[in-house]
């Protein structure tokens, strides 16, 4: 029987959705994507993603894969799936991948961004994609603290109580902090992330940026491996899954 594995690049505005993972409410990105693929292919489809995102979190390029017996051109899949999706979810590309490709386990790294609107007055236009902080933050102090997170560490202090990962050891490959007008944008790339890891890191950056904690305090948090030492979890709306890196696995397809 003919069967092919397809990978999808998906972007979504997570504001109105209860996260990625399927739930009984059916109000998730995964539920809508599977329904849309099923309506186009007339098959019962299960998709597997690179990394599940929480309610309110966005994605510029989430990656998922699924298997199908339907033989169609990639552009046909693209148009067909998108025709059944709501406006806030969109498939950007479709590619044929080898049978052993796995959206989660084949990934070499993930990149997230977190955007803070740092000004006295809130913004109606930016409210869905930034977290508004009225207290002035020093982005240079945040940048200095970010450098202390680079490399391999035990990030137990930054994981949520609901995190199911067997190990809290992760490698942060790159962190970049920049301020463009009133927006502080933090970009973090790692081999993998723990549940709420980025939002808890940003919570620590908030304390450092406003001068409540020293730059070196971030090392104390890491060394403690204690969630109670870490700062509060920042809101989801500023968080966006930017990109999944698969090396050359997707380039030739």
Image (cartoon, rainbow, N blue to C red):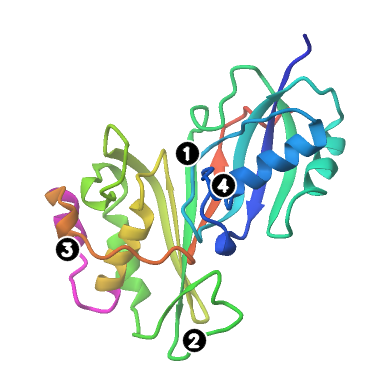
First-in-chain label (1 vs 4): 1
- Numbered circle sitting on residue 243: 4
Q: Residue 16 occupies which quadrant of the picture?
A: bottom right
- Cα distance, mark 1 to mark 4? 9 Å
First-in-chain label (3 vs 2): 2
Tag 2 and tag 4, C-beta contact below 8 Å: no
- Cα distance, mark 3 to mark 2? 29 Å
Horizontal side of residue 207 vs 174, given as left or right: left
Q: Which residue is mark 3?
A: 217
- Cα distance, mark 2 to mark 4? 28 Å
Tag 3 and tag 4, C-beta contact below 8 Å: no
Highlighted range, magenta: 209-223
- Numbered circle sitting on residue 109: 1
Say which of 150 and 128 sits in front.
Answer: 128
Image quadrant in which the C terminus is located: top right
Q: Position of residue 179 (x, y in %)?
A: 47, 74
Q: Position of residue 63 (x, y in %)?
A: 60, 40
Q: Is residue 198 above or below residue 250?
A: below
Number of numbered discs on residues: 4
Q: Position of residue 22 (x, y in %)?
A: 54, 43
Secondary-structure class at tag 4: strand
Is disc 3 surrounded by few (<14), some (14 to 19) or many (20+) residues within 10 Å? some
- Cα distance, mark 3 to mark 4? 29 Å
Q: Residue at x 38, y 44 (%)?
A: 193
Secondary-structure class at tag 3: helix
Q: Which residue is mark 2?
A: 122
Q: Nearer the viewer, mark 3 or mark 2?
A: 2
Q: Residue furthest top?
A: 1
First-in-chain label (1 vs 3): 1
Q: Residue at x 31, y 62 (%)?
A: 233
């Amino acid at each position: 029987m003919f069967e092919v594995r397809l990978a999808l690049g998906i972007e979504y505005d997570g504001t109105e959705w209860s996260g990625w993972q399927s739930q009984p409410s059916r109000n998730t990105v995964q539920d809508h994507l599977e329904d849309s693929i099923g309506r186009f292919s007339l098959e019962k489809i299960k998709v597997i993603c690179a990394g599940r995102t929480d309610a309110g979190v966005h994605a510029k390029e989430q990656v998922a894969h699924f298997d199908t017996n339907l033989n169609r051109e990639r552009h046909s899949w693209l148009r067909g799936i998108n025709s059944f999706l709501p406006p806030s979810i969109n498939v950007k590309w479709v590619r044929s991948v080898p049978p052993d490709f796995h959206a989660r386990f084949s990934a070499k790294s993930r990149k997230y961004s977190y955007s803070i609107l740092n000004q006295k007055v809130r913004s109606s236009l930016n409210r869905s994609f930034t977290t508004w902080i009225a207290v002035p933050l020093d982005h240079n102090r945040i940048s200095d603290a970010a450098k202390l997170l680079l490399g391999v560490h035990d990030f137990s202090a930054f994981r949520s109580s609901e995190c199911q990962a067997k190990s809290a050891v992760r490698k942060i490959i790159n962190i970049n902090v920049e301020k463009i007008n009133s927006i502080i944008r933090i970009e973090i790339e790692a081999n993998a992330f723990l549940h709420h890891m980025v939002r808890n890191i940003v919570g620590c950056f908030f304390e450092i940026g406003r001068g409540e904690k020293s730059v070196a305090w971030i090392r104390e948090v890491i060394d403690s491996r204690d969630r109670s030492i870490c700062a509060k979890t920042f809101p989801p709306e500023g968080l966006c899954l930017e990109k999944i890196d698969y090396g050359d696995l997707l380039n030739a397809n």
